[in-house]
Image: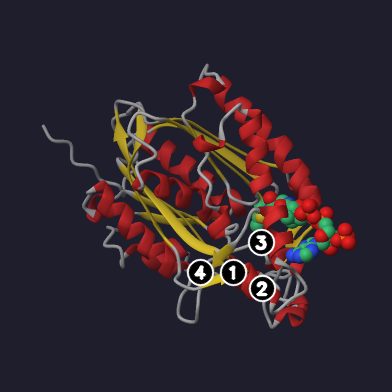
Amino acid sequence: AHRVFDPRVSTGGDRVKYSRIAGTGSYLPDKIVTNHDLEAIMDTNDQWIRERTGIRERRTVIEGETTATLARAACQKAIEAADVDPNEIDLFVMGTTTPDLVFPSTACLLQKQLGLPDCGAMDVNAACSGFMYALSVGDKYIRCGDARKVLVCGAETLSRIVNWNKRETAVLFGDGAGAVVLEASDEPGILSTHIHANGNYVDVLTTNAGISVGWDAVAENDGKPEIMMRGNEVFKVAVRTLGRIVEETLSANDMDKTDLDWLIPHQANLRIIAAMARMLDMNMDHVVVTVDRHGNTSAASVPLALDEAVRDGRIQRGDMLLLEAFGGGFTWGSALIKY
Ligand code: ACO
């Protein structure tokens, strides 16, 4: 008999072996800010930005656009690509560190707009690793049998918490959203997800104001909190730590780096991405790069890159994908996926 799935009751229903990506989607705001645009407002230059980061331009929201509006467009595209009825989605997980409001969560703000049923909807905050965290939650819900279809999104408006007078951070970030629909499957699928954190590095990458600590610092940035980062230290730890999680991910699956078809890394800096490719003996043709056009979109960067390479036909069904991200916390995460 046809099993009727009731997402509101945790039944520990039929366990399936895997979740698989049924469809992907992404969305970028229209406004483009080039390095030359930044030269006009701060003491920086196109050459420095390109050589140190690989970034040429980034997208930023304009008035009226928010994390939720970007996420909504990306989720709709993912739902369409997956060809699922939104009413069948059992859980909605959003990775974001720039939610529209303190509450309701961005996922809740969008739940009814997207036509989802009264399913669980939540935001996960793991800074730039937000999508990897959200993906791992969705994957686990499906594998334990409590959900059959999960919408996972990473969306950010980091431009809203950048100090546009500080060249050290302002040139790095951009806005966007990416999403996937996961569904239960007997065939792989997501083979494994891995998430980690180390809270000893708070001072190296953080924001300077917030709900509970207060807003005194925002006077320095037009009434907004701002990203504080010692970029050089982050860089070194990121490369080392991502190297470790890549090994952990491959060995958890008894696989070797030669088994990988595509690396879909977090897009913070082209030099970090190139270091990862070297570590994996991967030619840059097998690494999806968007940082040149998107900048660092935090939790949105991995699903944006994934969607781009799926839609332009580079990533094909059956390909072995390694996704990884590193960000504030520090947090880091990865997933090995047979697409
Ligand atoms: N334009 C021109 N010069 C600049 C700029 C700029 N935008 N920014 C810094 N400089 C100068 C500095 O003042 C410094 O000058 P000095 O030598 O006279 O003191 C010089 O450039 C070198 O600065 P560094 O910070 O040492 O440059 P570095 O090569 O480390 O590059 C960068 C900086 C791009 C930030 C790099 O360290 C990086 O990408 N770090 C990792 C970022 C990251 O991965 N973040 C994680 C995710 S973010 C999140 O979770 C929200």
Q: Tell me, for residue 103, which label it has, or none.
A: 4
Q: Nearer the viewer, mark 2 or mark 3?
A: 2
Is ligand 1 less than 8 Å from the beta carbon at label 3? Answer: yes
Q: CA distance from mark 4 to mark 3?
A: 28 Å
Q: Tell me, for residue 172, which label it has, or none.
A: 3
Say what amino acid the circle numbered 3 marks.
Answer: Leu
Q: Is residue 327 above or below residue 143?
A: below
Q: For the residue carrying disc 1, how many other residues have a C-alpha within 10 Å: few (<14), some (14-19), or many (20+)?
A: some
- Expressed as whole percent of the image width and height from the top left, the position of residue 99 reads 53, 66
- Expressed as whole percent of the image width and height from the top left, the position of residue 220 reads 77, 80
Residue at image location 61% in from the left, 54% down from the top: 127
Residue bearing mark 2: 38
Question: What secondary structure is marked by label 2?
Answer: helix
Looking at the rendering, the quadrant in which ligand 1 lies is bottom right
Q: CA distance from mark 2 to mark 4?
A: 33 Å
Q: Is residue 275 visible?
A: yes
Is ligand 1 less than 8 Å from the beta carbon at label 2? Answer: yes
The residue closer to the viewer here, 298 or 11, is: 298
Q: Nearer the viewer, mark 2 or mark 4?
A: 2
Q: For the residue carrying disc 2, how many other residues have a C-alpha within 10 Å: few (<14), some (14-19), or many (20+)?
A: some
